[in-house]
Image (spheres, rainbow, N blue to C red):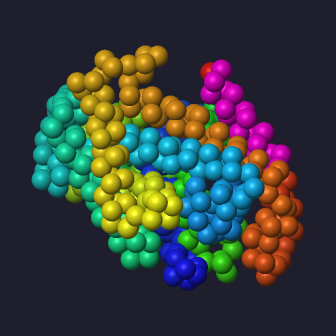
């Protein structure tokens, strides 16, 4: 199979698909909240620095591994390191991370589907704040409906995947990502035209360096890295689909710009609205599923904007779950020689079986805890704090210290076609800066 037929048909297709993978629930509820809590503009500047200095080089690293090998995450290490089979273990770590992330991510994605239905059928409007909170608590603590919506979300994702890289992933990303931006802009206009919107913008952007602690700086580092979906092979897999003539640097840059823009605009949607109605900017799921429905209930045409918002959240989640499942499917298709259909179906069922435990950890299984954490929280912690940073560290060691420099340079410069001094900068970050930053994240995760 040559590259033309194997992967994305255009650079814009690659950018939109990978940006879809990166833009997710993390951008919409986590980023704005972190920004607000950690000195607004101060956090933004630090985060921006980390995205440029570490996020983009790490994404390029995954792209180099994937495109060089023309292979899924397991096959990539096997092909690039035929004599040292040990590296292949990293590929399996990537698959494991994808399974665990998808298992808990699909829970929240399923909630979004429920809220799309509720918003579109006008079930949210007219509720008092206490009723909105109860609705969320009762829904998530249940068994049947959250599991059903999780199943539906998994089915939707598997359906897209089963159509293949070009007709499924690339095509849907080219439609959904522009739609996501349009819906987001619509929400931005709505939010900024509310009375008192200025206060929210102030909360969000006013740079207060005194509010940015060491933990906040570390949070900015971790966020840049989680938000770009690095360290588990999503970008290795998508990298293997990028055309040989595309610049890996420019592609990474555009993906990061999209990711950051959505995160910032999500803040511009959420905080002016929250402040305008005098509500408390809570973090996490509460913000999106409880605070915002209340905000929508208080604004003119709120029912419409609630529907728009949850559809937007659904799109952001879907393009991310697609990137998660594709890591697994690319592996089963290429390594186990299963058909794409069979791979999509079986991997979906496996995720569903594991994912149900995550869903039920908000209800019947909420007391099934380890170290005081529910199954959902454990999966989140294991992946975000350990598997992803450790995976990324291993990638930098593999590419920076083990794989020949000339080969890396050849892949980054497209065989010498692309000139520029940037390669040496990238290579320095790859060998020294990125591994050091990752070690700090990992150690602080263990200590803190
Ligand atoms: N980047 C996604 C987000 O911000 C999360 C994610 C991580 C998705 C890893 C896929 C893989 O929500």
Q: Residue at x 68, y 68 (%)?
A: 68
> In the image, which residues are magenta?
430-447
For image coordinates 82% across by 79% down, the residue present is: 416
Residue at image coords 30%, 41% = 353
Residue 113 lies within the magenta run: no
Query: Which of 406/310 is in front?
Result: 406
Report if residue 202 is visible in the image. no
Q: Is residue 326 above or below residue 417?
A: above
Image mark count: 0
Which residue corresponds to the image point at 24% horizontal and 49% vertical from the top-left?
A: 151
Q: Please state which of residues 140 and 442 is positioned toward the viewer in this rendering.
A: 442
From the image, which quarter does the N terminus lie in? bottom right
Q: Depth check: 436 or 347 in front? A: 347
> Measured from the top left, where is residue 180 in percent x and y?
39, 63
- The answer to whether 76 is drawn above or below residue 306 in the figure is below
- Tell me the quarter of the image containing the C terminus: top right
| Corner quadrant of residue 359 | top left
Q: Is residue 46 left or right of residue 15?
A: right
Residue 234 is situated, as x and y percent measured from the top left of the image, at 54, 56
User: In this rendering, is residue 353 above or below 16?
Assistant: above
The quarter of the displayed image where residue 444 is located:
top right
Question: In this orientation, does residue 263 appear?
Answer: yes
Would residue 433 be counted in the magenta stretch? yes
Q: Which percent across, then down, holds residue 398?
A: 75, 51
**In terms of depth relative to the viewer, which is nearer, 280 or 155?**
155
Dominant secondary-structure state across the stretch colored magenta: helix
What is the x, y in percent for residue 246? 65, 77
Answer with left or right where residue 391 lies relative to residue 167. right
């Amino acid at each position: 199979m040559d590259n033309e037929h194997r992967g994305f048909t255009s650079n814009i297709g690659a950018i939109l698909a990978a940006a879809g993978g990166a833009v997710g629930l993390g951008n919409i509820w986590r980023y704005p909240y972190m920004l607000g809590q950690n000195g607004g503009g101060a956090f933004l500047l630090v985060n921006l620095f980390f995205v440029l200095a570490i996020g983009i080089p790490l994404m390029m690293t995954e792209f180099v591994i994937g495109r060089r090998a023309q292979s899924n995450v397991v096959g990539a290490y096997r092909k690039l390191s035929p004599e040292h089979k040990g590296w292949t273990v990293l590929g399996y770590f990537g698959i494991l991370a994808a399974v665990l992330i998808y298992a808990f991510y699909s829970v929240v994605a399923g909630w979004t589907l429920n809220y799309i239905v509720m918003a579109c059928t006008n079930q949210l409007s007219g509720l008092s704040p206490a009723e909105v909170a109860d609705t969320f608590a009762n829904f998530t603590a249940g068994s049947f409906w959250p599991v059903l919506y999780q199943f539906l979300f998994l089915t939707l994702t598997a359906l897209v995947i089963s159509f293949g890289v070009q007709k499924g992933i690339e095509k849907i990303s080219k439609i959904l990502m522009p739609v996501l931006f349009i819906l987001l802009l619509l929400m931005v206009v709505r939010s900024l035209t509310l009375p008192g919107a200025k206060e929210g913008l102030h909360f969000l952007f006013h740079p207060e360096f005194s509010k940015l602690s060491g933990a906040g700086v570390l949070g900015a580092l971790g966020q840049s890295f989680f938000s770009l979906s690095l360290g588990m092979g999503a970008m290795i897999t998508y990298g293997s689909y990028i055309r040989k003539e595309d610049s890996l640097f420019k592609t990474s840059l555009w993906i990061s710009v999209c990711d950051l823009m959505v995160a910032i605009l999500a803040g511009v949607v959420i905080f002016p609205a929250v402040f305008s109605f005098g509500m408390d900017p809570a973090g996490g799921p509460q913000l999106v599923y409880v605070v915002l429905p209340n905000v929508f209930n208080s604004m003119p045409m709120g029912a419409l904007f609630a529907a728009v918002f949850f559809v937007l959240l659904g799109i952001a989640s879907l393009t991310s779950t697609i990137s998660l499942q594709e890591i697994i499917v690319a592996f089963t298709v290429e390594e186990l020689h299963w058909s794409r259909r069979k791979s999509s179906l079986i991997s979906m069922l496996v995720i569903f079986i594991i994912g149900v435990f995550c869903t039920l950890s908000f209800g019947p299984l909420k007391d099934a805890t380890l170290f005081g954490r529910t199954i959902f929280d454990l999966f989140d912690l294991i992946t975000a704090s350990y598997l992803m940073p450790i995976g990324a560290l291993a990638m930098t060691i593999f590419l920076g210290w083990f794989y020949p420099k000339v080969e890396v340079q050849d892949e980054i410069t497209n065989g010498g076609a692309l000139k520029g001094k940037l390669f040496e900068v990238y290579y320095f970050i790859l060998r020294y800066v990125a591994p050091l930053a990752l070690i700090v994240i990992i150690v602080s995760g263990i200590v803190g």
